């Protein structure tokens, strides 16, 4: 059973429907004490970093998410949810994130359209089970105005939007995707399935 963390700022409908199409059971969860009941967690997110981390803290979820990650069970952040996994963001002021991964979230800065919205290709940096079946050049769907600067050792894949853009990250059991896999066609569904496979057999 996969838990989708509901803190009031996630695109829950399309994500839950994607898991249904893959045949995986899920529940929405917003109670800190219940996170431990799941074999995997997904942290979605749409909106501003500061509002999101405030909601997470007001619901008492921050320490529960950190404790879950420390347990070794898989956790996946999607879009804003991926950004929340990092140490800080400068979106509308400076905000401290969950700190599960090292790095910071910054705004795109240049003479080009922001937000970055649309289909872009993945460039694979490291092979890992999450990427089984995914190829260099596969397209996924992005919608974001801020992006993550992080160390190369956590980068599984990047994309290009006038610069190298962090697309998929991983350290141990913590995973992140800047794009929306649930809106990314066959490649996105494959990535979600690969994450769900990581959750199979995990004891709660």
Image: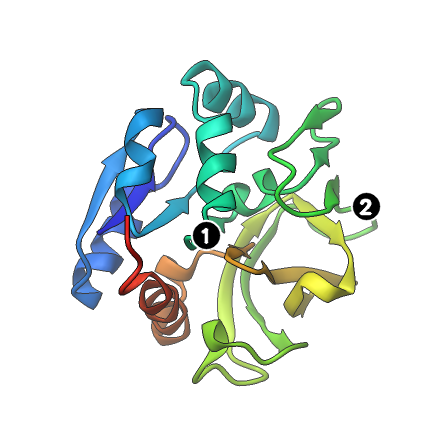
**Is the C-beta separation of discs 1 and 2 under 8 Å?**
no
**What's the image's color scheme?**
rainbow
Give the percent coordinates (x, y) of residue 145.
Answer: 65, 43
* Residue that sits furthest to the right in the current view: 110
- The residue that disc 2 covers is 109
- Indicate the quadrant where residue 6 lies: top left
Along the horizontal axis of the image, is 186 left or right of 179? Answer: left
Give the percent coordinates (x, y) of residue 104.
Answer: 74, 42
Q: Residue at x 45, y 81 (%)?
A: 132
Give the percent coordinates (x, y) of residue 38.
Answer: 28, 45
Q: Residue at x 82, y 51 (%)?
A: 111
Indicate whether 33 appears above or below 105: above
- Indicate the quadrant where residue 51 lies: top right
Along the horizontal axis of the image, is 102 left or right of 136? Answer: right
Q: Residues within 10 Å of mark 2 (few under 14, many from 20)?
A: few
Whether residue 35 can be seen here: yes
Query: Foreground: 46 or 203?
Result: 203
Q: Secondary structure at mark 1?
A: strand
Q: Which mark is residue 23?
A: none
Mark closer to the chain start, 1 or 2 = 1
Measure the C-alpha gap from mark 1 to mark 2: 27 Å
Q: Secondary structure at mark 2?
A: loop
Indicate whether 63 appears above or below 159: above
Along the horizontal axis of the image, is 37 left or right of 126? Answer: left
- The residue that disc 1 covers is 76
- Indicate the quadrant where residue 50 lies: top right
Give the percent coordinates (x, y) of residue 100.
Answer: 61, 43
Whether residue 162 can be seen here: no
């Amino acid at each position: 059973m996969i838990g989708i963390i509901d803190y009031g700022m996630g695109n829950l409908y399309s994500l839950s429907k994607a898991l249904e199409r893959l045949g995986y059971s899920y529940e929405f969860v917003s109670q800190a004490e219940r996170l431990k009941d799941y074999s995997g967690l997904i942290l979605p997110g749409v909106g501003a970093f500061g509002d999101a981390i405030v909601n997470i803290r007001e619901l008492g979820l921050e320490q529960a998410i950190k404790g879950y990650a420390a347990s070794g069970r898989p956790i996946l952040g999607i879009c804003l949810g991926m950004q929340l996994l990092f140490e800080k963001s400068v979106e509308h002021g400076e905000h401290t994130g969950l700190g599960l991964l090292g790095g910071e979230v910054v705004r795109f800065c240049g003479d080009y359209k922001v937000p970055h919205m649309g289909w872009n290709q993945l460039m694979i940096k490291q092979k890992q089970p999450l990427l089984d079946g995914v190829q260099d050049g596969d397209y996924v769907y992005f919608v974001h105005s801020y992006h993550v600067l992080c160390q190369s050792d956590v980068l599984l894949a990047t994309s290009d939007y006038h610069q190298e853009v962090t697309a998929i990250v991983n350290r141990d059991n913590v995973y992140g995707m800047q794009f929306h896999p649930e809106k990314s066609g066959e490649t996105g569904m494959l990535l979600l399935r690969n994450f769900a496979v990581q959750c199979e057999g995990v004891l709660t």
